[in-house]
Image (tube, rainbow, N blue to C red):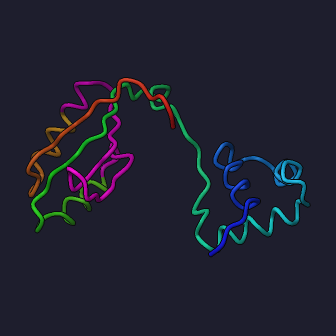
């Protein structure tokens, strides 16, 4: 799969604002809007563009306590714990990793008390050995 400079520029533009019109993208690239449409469809078919979404400020939605949490799990319980975490509304991002922790999760809570309860709930799941939260103080880049 070879992407050229125009494909990469389209991706950059859409990452900044997924609602940018094909006409605006075409104008920036110096190509037709039909060419932009074809390139975007190709990028979607190749799986380069997987979905379009929005980024929200959790604090504006009432979530004032956010953590990036490492979770260590017994190997035989790993997929059971992952399935359980996937079902939790408070888990906003979930990844299986090869780093210091087998699982990394981003958790949104209304306040620090709720966040502590969530971390306690996770620590009591069968197979969970350790929960290592890092509470986010400020986001400097998204």
Q: Is residue 95 above or below residue 115?
A: below
Which of the 4 quarters of the picture holds residue 134? Answer: top left
- State the residue at coordinates (80%, 64%): 37
Quadrant for the N terminus, please.
bottom right
Give yes or no for residue 108 being in the magenta stretch. yes
Q: Position of residue 78 (x, y in %)?
A: 18, 63
Camera-side residue: 6 or 113? 6
Q: Judge from the rendering whether residue 140 lies leftward or rightward of residue 86; answer left or right.
A: right
- State the residue at coordinates (11%, 46%): 130
Q: Position of residue 120 (x, y in %)?
A: 14, 38
- State the residue at coordinates (38%, 46%): 92
Q: Is residue 84 above or below residue 135?
A: below
- Image: magenta residue range: 88-116
Q: Position of residue 117 (x, y in %)?
A: 18, 34
Q: Judge from the rendering whether residue 71 lies leftward or rightward of residue 53; answer left or right.
A: left
Q: Position of residue 128 (x, y in %)?
A: 11, 52
Q: Judge from the rendering whether residue 49 lies leftward or rightward of residue 86; answer left or right.
A: right
Camera-side residue: 51 or 43? 43
- State the residue at coordinates (88%, 65%): 34
Q: Is residue 105 above or below residue 112?
A: below
Which of the 4 quarters of the picture holds residue 118? Answer: top left
């Amino acid at each position: 799969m070879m992407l050229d400079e125009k494909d990469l520029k389209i991706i950059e533009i859409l990452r900044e604002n997924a609602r940018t019109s094909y006409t605006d993208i075409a104008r920036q690239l110096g190509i037709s809007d039909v060419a932009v449409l074809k390139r975007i469809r190709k990028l979607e078919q190749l799986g380069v563009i997987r979905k379009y979404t929005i980024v929200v400020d959790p604090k504006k939605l009432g979530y004032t306590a956010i953590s990036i949490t490492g979770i260590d799990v017994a190997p035989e319980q790993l997929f059971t714990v992952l399935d359980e975490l996937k079902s939790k509304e408070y888990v906003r991002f979930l990844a299986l990793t090869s780093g210091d922790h087998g699982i990394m999760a981003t958790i949104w809570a209304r306040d620090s008390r709720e966040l502590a309860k969530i971390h306690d709930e996770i620590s009591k799941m069968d197979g969970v050995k350790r929960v290592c939260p890092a509470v986010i103080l400020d986001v400097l880049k998204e």
